[in-house]
Image: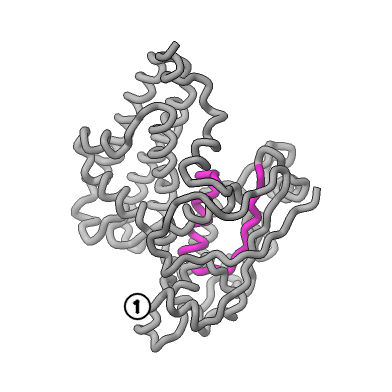
Amino acid sequence: MMATTMTTTMMTTAMGARSLGGGGGRLRRGRAMTTTNKMRTPATRRDGGRARAAARDGAAAHDGIVDAGLVHESSLASCGFAPDRRGATTNGKTTTAKETARMWTSATCPFAHRPWLALVESGAPFELNVENLENKSEGFKATFARASPDASGNPSVPILEHAGATMVESALVLKYVSETFGNDALIPKDPLKGYYGQIFADTFQACVPLYFKMLRATNAEELAEAESAFVAGLKKANRCLELGTNAREDGPYACGAQFTTCDIMAMTFVPRFEIVLDHYRGFNLRVTLKENDCAALESWIAAVSTRPSMVYTLGEIEKMTGKSLTDAFIAHFAKFVSWNPKAATAA
């Protein structure tokens, strides 16, 4: 099956707040969609990063680092937010920014969302191949088979192609992107903050299987049990943030002022928890956190939810699916839900 290539520009004004209404081109079923970029002029991009540009004498964030035509417009570099970098190394070998990364993803997958955020944050030049996982292309299957320990396994996202290598598994791809691009800006710089950030990320991620357990519940008793465990998990995550209060008092993220991979590993499930659990289980995440005195977790969620890269990528999900964010996430997780308590009550 041949992949359909769509050339598009992907940009928000200074990556700030944007409408989350529906729109954009709809992904065809059974086709892969490659997202590349046709760049606007450096002067246009400088408008998006006015504050940073002024600090650097009007230069775009990527000037002197990569050719303008190679910078993906979804990157923070194109908006003036990316950290300075003059090269990166992989296993001691210098990799130039001109080696464009190519990532296979699914528009609504929370795991593939992780390295996508890192690519946007890093300012790395990259392409996205958006795959319909309900009708996988032959190219996607072949690419997965080249990298997976189980070549005959069920192909999944993300898959990253860069510097002659093909990589799988979201945590490993996130690690590679963070270490290869962006001058290690996403790697915790302070070991103690890194400790507290990582224990929080690990604890928050332990809520993910409980989230799926809530969706898969087949009766009220199973749902109540799963919900109780999920809330207990949220309270543990909140406690992790409280334990690190002194170490991370300089900022709202898991490691304080520095936004890191600890945040990325956890944050992609936040909008999914909010939207999907409210729709299918009548569970309000924000109200639950307030009722259980989880102020630290509330503050962290507020910070990552308004992070420019998060706002931007959520907007792009709408473009990729042709749906509102709410409808896109509800449709994605529908396959995990077989019992509807509202329907059972009505009956």
Q: Position of residue 126 (x, y in %)?
A: 60, 65
Residue in the picture at 38% in, 52% down:
263
Q: Position of residue 314 (x, y in %)?
A: 47, 52
Q: Residues within 10 Å of mark 1 (few under 14, many from 20)?
A: some
Residue 221 is left or right of residue 243, and the answer is right
Q: Position of residue 32 (x, y in %)?
A: 70, 50
Q: Nearer the viewer, residue 239 or 79?
A: 79
> Which picture quadrant has residue 188?
bottom left
Residue in the picture at 22% in, 38% down:
290
Residue 281 is left or right of residue 235, and the answer is right
Residue type (three-letter) at the residue carrying disc 1 = Ala
Residue in the picture at 51% in, 66% down:
11
Q: Nearer the viewer, residue 123 or 149?
A: 123
Image position of 215 with respect to 76: above or below: above
Residue carrying label 1: 51
Residue 21 is left or right of residue 237, and the answer is right
The residue at the far top in this view is 347
Which residues are the magenta region? 107-132
Quarter of the picture containing the C terminus is top left
Image position of 46 with respect to 239: above or below: below
Q: Is-magenta flag for residue 108? A: yes
Q: Position of residue 165 (x, y in %)?
A: 67, 59
